[in-house]
Amino acid sequence: MTFEPETVSASALREAIEALGYEVEEVGPYRNRGATTNSAPRLSFPENPPPALADALRKAKSEKRILVVDFWATWCGPCQKLKKHTLADEAVKKLLEGALLVLIDVDEHSAIARAWGVKSVPDVVFLSPDGRVLDRLHGFEGPVAFAKRLRNAMARHER
């Protein structure tokens, strides 16, 4: 089943399907049915990460904030739309004050993109300060859905 993320959030789709009496299984490396934050997979950080990522990781650990790592490329239309439409949205910017946003150009840092399983861009990874994957977004998402995803990732980190 597919859905338009601009119109319907994944959680609303899940609720609607479950209300009909069906089980929902979300498939992806960051989702594990019934998983808690403690059982979420961890991403390994390279020995020499890009400086922006290394700085954000240190700050995330000291301030106990989540990391939002946006893998993007200059030639990627959806990446530019995410940056100009979603990340520039006032509500999203306000929420991002409680997180640390790191932009990683896949052309400049292909090794970490490969190591983290980035297959297409944009690919946005929501991480706890210790590297646990809280959520992952593949592709463009509008500001309302992105804000909800970010709030959910922050709530999972706080648990």
Image: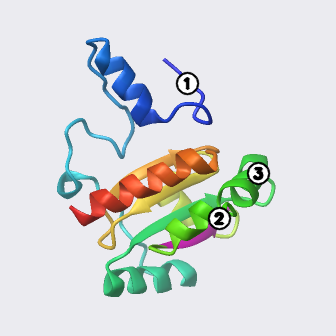
Q: Is residue 42 visible?
A: no
User: Is 158 part of what is drawn in magenta?
Assistant: no
User: Which residue is found at the position 30% from the left and 18% from the top?
Assistant: 19
Which residue has dot 2 on it? Answer: 90
Cβ–Cβ under 8 Å for marks 3 and 1: no
* Apparent side of residue 136 relative to residue 109 in the rendered image (left or right): left
**Mark nearer the viewer, 1 or 2:** 2
Cβ–Cβ under 8 Å for marks 1 and 2: no
Give the total of numbered labels. Answer: 3
User: Is 103 part of what is drawn in magenta?
Assistant: yes
Instruction: Give how far across and how far down residue 15 sits, in percent.
Output: 35, 27
Label 3 crowd bin: few (<14), some (14–19), many (20+), radius 10 Å: few
Q: Quadrant of residue 61?
A: bottom left
* Apparent side of residue 60 relative to residue 141 in the rendered image (left or right): left
Which residue has dot 1 on it? Answer: 3
User: Which residue is found at the position 40% from the left and 51% from the top?
Assistant: 135
Q: Where is 63 relative to 134, above or below?
A: below
| Element on which disc 3 rests | loop
Instruction: Give how far across and how far down residue 38 sits, in percent.
Output: 18, 58
The colour scheme used here is: rainbow
**Mark nearer the viewer, 3 or 2:** 2
Q: Where is 149 relative to 48, above or below?
A: above
Instruction: Give how far across and how far down residue 4 sits, in percent.
Output: 60, 28
Which mark sits nearer the N-terminus, 1 or 2?
1
Q: Amino acid at mark 3?
A: Cys
What mark, if any, has residue 28 been given in the picture? none
User: Which residue is found at the position 47% from the left and 50% from the top?
Assistant: 148
> Front-most of 120 and 40?
40
Which residue has dot 3 on it? Answer: 76
Cα–Cα span, label 3 and label 2: 23 Å
Which mark sits nearer the N-terminus, 3 or 1?
1
